[in-house]
Image (cartoon, rainbow, N blue to C red):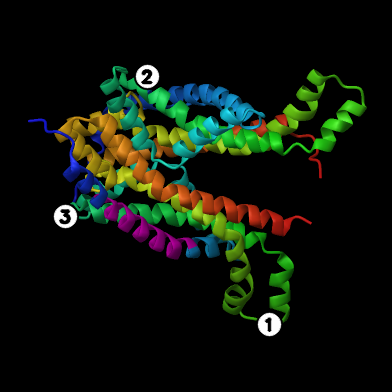
């Protein structure tokens, strides 16, 4: 039975936004923690750590997010765990974000002039103090714009979790579409909601980028 | 204890390789058409027409701030509602071209704007004609500037193209999905399919680096 697309459908779709936002938040926070470790390993003095983190980044940046989601989703069965789309999605997206943020932040750490590290070493600061008080605060300023840019990519990426059956914004749209068969309006609305979430972030990232460019031009 | 069963994967390995070929073909077709869209888009973005500027600006922003999955659903399921029915493979190609065209427009525009104006004036002072200036002074440095971003965009496009399997267009991911439906060796199949994607992206990034070293090997300007 096909019914008319109505206000309750709009409400159902809008309510699903919280799952998109929640999943994005989990992946971003998890990815930030993982990404910090990856970035530190990538720019560390140990060759083994550098190689392992480079391999990690290469694997997650060199394979489709959709396949990563499938692997973590079916991987739960391999580990004899019950199938749980939210858990699989959260883990997959966290690894995905760790790799991307790790690579972005490695670049930011390396963009801090090496004289800063040398000066800190000359003052006999420990690795921890050197990173925490000298290098990372300066790297953070450089990292903000590309990090916000990646957040947009991550929010868009959560749409793929609909394919493993997690009911976020895109899946809510599919469910409503199956009942109303009004795809033009339904997916138009879903796209508009993503746009409302992502566009301000993109504009903010671009403004930061412009400001950074001014700061670095002499 | 889970028992791994790679037999269905190895028995159908030729199918998976054929899938890899489909993905390469789709990505190249989308990239070439996408480059045409990019150049036209960038030309419009740097032109003086306010209308063109606004239209292309809206296109770039809308595509870059919505998920590819929703774009392809809109194209494949939404357009038939207004009388335009598309074959899944055609819809997949169009969706990818529209998507990569938006990113490519921004990359190309940045590349054109990165050529310093003094360089063009220097070309004019040396008596070069407009075509020579475009070819040697603007195009080649601009190409060198956009090359790294464009090639990583290509690899990203190839990875994104796995999403077209959701509308059952033909590619590596959809062949993986078919095998999964037939044999239920899900984890094993997706592990190998993911591995093939990894090999493809490593291969192409290596190839692009070789080309870069061969073509753009003259010293950079400061």
Residue under the image location 50 percent in, 24 percent down:
B28
Residue A55 in sight in this render: no
Q: From the viewer's side, name the closer residue of A211 and A128.
A: A211
Which residues are the magenta region? Answer: A16-35
Q: Position of residue A132 (x, y in %)?
A: 57, 75
The residues bearing labels 1 and 3 have C-alpha atoms spaced at a distance of: 51 Å
Q: Is residue A162 magenta?
A: no
Q: Which residue is mark 3?
A: A82
Labels 3, 2: front one: 2
Q: Position of residue A203 (x, y in %)?
A: 52, 50
Task: Specify the farthest residue to the bottom.
Answer: A124
For the C terminus of chain B, the image quarter is top right
Closer to the N terminus: mark 1 or mark 3? 3
The residues bearing labels 3 and 2 have C-alpha atoms spaced at a distance of: 38 Å
Q: Which residue is mark 2?
A: B90
Per the image, label 2 sits on a secondary structure element best described as helix
Locate residue B172: give its quadrant.
top left
Circle number at residue A124:
1
Q: Position of residue B113 (x, y in %)?
A: 70, 37
Same chain letter for marks 1 and 3: yes
Magenta part, dominant SS: helix
Locate residue A211: give its quadrant.
bottom right
Q: Examine the rendered structure and indicate whether residue A152 appears above or below residue B141.
A: below
Labels 2, 1: front one: 2
Left/right of residue B209 with respect to residue A216 in the rendered view = left
Residue under the image location 26 percent in, 36 percent down:
A186
What is the count of numbered marks?
A: 3
Locate residue B23: give its quadrant.
top left
Q: Examine the rendered structure and indicate whether residue B197 appears above or below residue B14.
A: below
Q: Examine the rendered structure and indicate whether residue A191 appears above or below residue B138.
A: below
Q: Residues within 10 Å of mark 3 (few under 14, many from 20)?
A: few
């Amino acid at each position: 039975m096909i019914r008319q697309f109505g206000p309750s459908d709009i409400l159902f779709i809008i309510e699903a936004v919280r799952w998109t936002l929640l999943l994005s938040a989990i992946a971003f926070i998890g990815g930030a923690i993982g990404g910090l470790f990856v970035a530190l390993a990538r720019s560390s003095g140990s060759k083994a750590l550098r190689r392992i983190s480079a391999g990690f980044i290469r694997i997650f940046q060199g394979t489709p997010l959709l396949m990563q989601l499938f692997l973590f989703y079916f991987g739960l069965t391999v580990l004899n765990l019950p199938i749980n789309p939210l858990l699989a999605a959260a883990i997959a997206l966290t690894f995905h974000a760790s790799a991307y943020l790790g690579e972005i932040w490695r670049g930011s750490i390396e963009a801090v002039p090496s004289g800063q590290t040398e000066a800190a070493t000359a003052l006999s600061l420990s690795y921890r103090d050197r990173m925490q008080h000298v290098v990372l605060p300066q790297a953070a300023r450089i990292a903000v714009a590309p990090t916000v840019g990646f957040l947009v990519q991550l929010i868009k990426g959560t749409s793929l979790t609909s394919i493993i059956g997690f009911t976020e914004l895109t899946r809510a749209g599919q469910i409503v579409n199956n009942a109303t068969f009004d795809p033009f309006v339904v997916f138009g609305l879903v796209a508009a909601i993503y746009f409302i979430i992502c566009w301000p972030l993109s504009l903010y990232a671009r403004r930061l980028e412009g400001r950074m460019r001014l700061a670095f031009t002499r | 204890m889970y028992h791994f069963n790679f037999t269905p994967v190895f028995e159908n390995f030729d199918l998976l390789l054929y899938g890899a070929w489909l993905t390469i073909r789709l990505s190249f077709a989308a990239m070439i058409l996408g480059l045409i869209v990019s150049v036209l888009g960038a030309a419009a973005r740097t032109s003086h027409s306010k209308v063109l500027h606004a239209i292309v600006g809206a296109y770039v922003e809308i595509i870059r701030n919505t998920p590819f999955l929703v774009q392809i659903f809109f194209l494949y399921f939404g357009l038939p509602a207004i009388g335009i029915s598309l074959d899944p493979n055609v819809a997949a190609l169009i969706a990818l071209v529209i998507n990569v065209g938006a990113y490519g427009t921004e990359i190309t525009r940045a590349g054109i704007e990165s050529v310093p104006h003094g360089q063009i004036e220097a070309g004019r002072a040396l008596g070069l004609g407009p075509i020579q200036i475009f070819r040697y002074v603007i195009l080649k440095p601009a190409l060198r500037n956009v090359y790294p971003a464009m090639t990583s965009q290509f690899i990203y496009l190839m990875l994104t193209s796995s999403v077209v399997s959701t509308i059952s267009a033909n590619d590596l991911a959809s062949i993986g999905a078919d095998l999964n439906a037939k044999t239920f060796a899900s984890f094993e199949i997706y592990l190998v399919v993911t591995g093939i994607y990894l090999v493809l992206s490593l291969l192409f990034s290596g190839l692009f680096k070789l080309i870069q070293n061969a073509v753009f090997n003259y010293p950079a300007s400061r």
